[in-house]
Amino acid sequence: MINLDDWAEIRHLFSTGKHSKREIGRIVGVSRGTVDRALESDRAPKYQGAAGGSSFDAFAPRVRELLVKTPTMPAATLAERVGWSGSASLFRAKVAVIRPEYAPPDPADRLVHEPGFQVQCDLWFPHAPLPVGEGQSDTPPVQGNPSAFSGFIQARMLPSRTTPDLLGGMWTLLQDAQAVPSRLLWDNESGIGRRRPTEPVAAFAGSLGLEIKLLPARDPESKGMVERMNRFFRQRFMPGRDFRSPADVNGQLEDWLPKANHRYSRSRHGRPDELIVLDRERMRELPPVSPEAVFRNAVRLPRDYYVRVFSNDYSVDPSFIGRIVDVVADLDTVWVTHDGVIIATHVRAWARHLVVTDPAHVARAAVMRRDFRTQRVHRPEPVESVEVRDLAAYDEIFGIDLGQRPALLEVAS
């Protein structure tokens, strides 16, 4: 069979009109008949081998019967039902070819994103653990928020994927943008909600007047943008970088994101940092009152004057032992209040199972303990009061008047 290069060369030489067919055959190195067939064919030569049989052919009718009843039956189950004992990869490949003939079509529309309408949210995790303090290493989540219209990316590493921290991450990024979109899109993150938002998340959305939409399971088309963002972080941000702490990660992200948002987007025909101007013009301003986006708990301060926030214990002024205190924590700080007065403040620890102590609280506890012991030593002995009965009451009962002197009886001798 003539190859493509020889076919093209034969037709080229003949089109010049300077060579006969015999000369063309001698130049190309083929027979005169091959030259005739090449000139008669108006399509490039293509090898078409004879269709060969496959070990799957004997099982195909039974597979088709099963697919008629259950088009979504997994290939492994089909292989078990028909008694297939050959290559699993071959069986999967053959089933993938014939399954579309029986599976119902599932079309996906092209999404059109309006300016200021939607921001997609998701979490991605570093490829390797990084130091989080006290000799511990972890892979804290990074919340990424790409705008659906402009592709502008915001990101921040969070201490955890709990609801308070996710709310804190959303609120921090909205504050950085100084704008509120109409919708935030999440993909079934447990801290946000399953099928419906959790109560704190619903309250957060209501305070901002936006919609938090949770995607259904197995709906990758609706969140393709955030998946591409996660891949972009893994391929362009993470390689070759070393991190000393979560704060270092956020610092490097802050330096790198302006470069990432300045890249040209062919699908949008512009740069994200330029398109974001129109995007945020269509968004609303931040509300005058901040939403609830912190961890909050009210406890009675125990004798050891520590309160727990997630997995860590933080010291509190021991003067408030036995009183109800309010514990509040955001992404950076933990503080404790009593009747609206701050009585303890700590930098939030990212490591786990720590005891965070303020030396001033320990010193205050030592003074209070010394005063308590001193009071016990110098405490006066209690005087027991014993009630004394008035014996004159018995004289009144028996009619005895001790005011009269009894007469003396004379006794004869």
Image: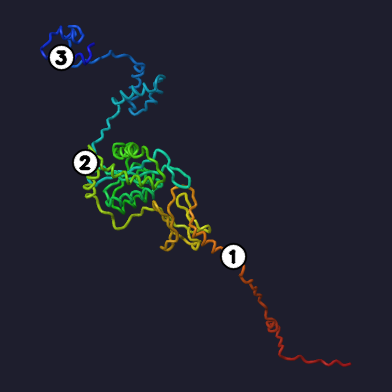
Q: Earlier in the sequence, mark 2 or mark 3?
A: 3
* Residue 160, image x, y percentages: 41, 46
Q: Is residue 359 left or right of residue 265?
A: right
Question: At 44% across and 43% down in the image, what residue appears?
Answer: 138
- At x 37% / y 27%, what residue is drawn? 74
> Which amino acid, by three-letter code, is at mark 1?
Arg
- What numbered label is drawn on residue 270? 2
Looking at the rendered structure, the secondary structure element under dot 1 is helix
Mark 3 or mark 1, which is nearer to you?
3
Q: Earlier in the sequence, mark 2 or mark 1?
A: 2
* Label 3 to label 1: alpha-carbon separation: 111 Å
Crowding at mark 3 (Cα within 10 Å: few <14, some 14-19, many 20+): some
The answer to which image quadrant residue 408 occupies is bottom right
Which residue, given by chain and number where applicable, does mark 3 sit on? 11
Nearer mark to the viewer, of 2 and 1 = 2
Q: Position of residue 257 (x, y in %)?
A: 30, 44
Work out whether residue 266 can be spotted.
Answer: yes
For badge 2, the amino acid type reads Gly
Percent from the top left, x then y, of residue 4? 21, 16
Between the residue at mark 2 and the residue at mark 1, the CA separation in whole angstroms equals 74 Å
Q: Which mark is residue 373?
A: 1
- Badge 2: how crowded within 10 Å, few (<14), some, or many (20+)? some
Q: Mark 3 vs mark 1: which is more N-terminal?
A: 3
Q: Look at the picture and state if 289 lies above or below 184.
A: below
Q: Nearer the viewer, residue 408 or 138?
A: 138
